[in-house]
Image: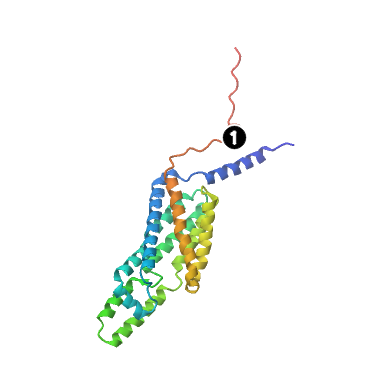
Amino acid sequence: MTITGSGHTSAGSADSQSRGMRAPPDPSWRRLYRVGSWAAAAYVLLVLTAMVLLAAAPLPPSSGAALLEYIDAHGVVYVVELVCFVGLSVPALIVFTAWAMALGHVDKSMALIGGLFGVASEITALAVGSSPQSLNGGLLTLSTSYQSATTAGERAGLASAADAVIATTNAMPWAGVLTAAGILILSLVAWRGPVPAAVAAFGILTGAVGIVAEALRPLIDVGYLIYGLLLPAWFILTGWRLSTFGRYGPVSAPSTSDDSASSPTPPPEAAE
């Protein structure tokens, strides 16, 4: 049985392409990878800070008048929670950008789409400036006005305004759906790239669960905590991989058997 030269070349090309996908990412972006790993650590730190406050302090109510009273009594806690949950979008922007660049050599199109989904979600979250549960910068102003109101009618009007803000804040956040979709797409790319299979699979699970959890957030209540635990864990794993990529130096393309086979053999020297 003979093997044609074209068949041998095709198999070698596929093997070379597979090695290219598993190869380390472009080392010229090492600084971005390192910054991305630090940003992932900052994201997790902000999440942990907010979680500790949520566990230590009473949860913000979901009704207007009660929440305005809560903000007046727990102003510092409320502001810190707001800053943590909204501010974590800043390091998340960097992580999504770095992760997309690290996976670009595997599938440029899908890595770009996943990165854009993640970046767009975080920009949207920053623009809205709010986060469930009942965390919104506008409520700080309403709380101040509520405390200085002198009549029951003024307080009722401010409480109604707060109810409207709370309803918008706690509705299904499209930014959250985009975040989960970005994680899912990037993890599908990572599955074929220089990432351990377990890490890529965890990202796929996080993204899939996140889309459902964000879409049904007003309905599942405590069930959302499952995604709330998966998300920072994904950032930890992603930050670890980015840190690893940031330590890679310039790499040269490995030589293949096909290359050596295709190189012409110099003719033997003529006998004297």
Amino acid under disc 1 = Ser
Instruction: Please report the residue visible at 60 percent of the width from the left and 44 percent of the height from the top.
Output: 14
Residue 121 seen in this snapshot: yes
The percent coordinates of residue 105 (x first, y second) are 50, 48
Q: Residues within 10 Å of mark 1 (few under 14, many from 20)?
A: few
Q: Nearer the viewer, residue 272 or 81?
A: 81
Residue 73 lies, with reference to residue 116, above or below; the image says below
Residue 260 lies, with reference to residue 130, above or below; the image says above
The percent coordinates of residue 92 (x first, y second) are 40, 58
* Quarter in which the C terminus is drawn: top right
Residue 188 seen in this snapshot: no
Q: Nearer the viewer, residue 200 or 110?
A: 200
Label 1: which secondary element: helix
Describe residue 165's horizontal placement relative to residue 209 as left or right.
left
Q: Nearer the viewer, residue 52 or 69?
A: 52
The percent coordinates of residue 235 (x first, y second) are 44, 56
* Quarter in which the N terminus is drawn: top right
Instruction: Please report the residue visible at 45 percent of the width from the left and 45 percent of the height from the top.
Output: 26
Residue 248 occupies quadrant: top left
Describe residue 192's horizontal placement relative to residue 93 as left or right.
right
Name the residue carrying label 1: 257
- Tell how many labels: 1
The percent coordinates of residue 230 (x first, y second) are 48, 60
Residue 68 occupies quadrant: bottom left
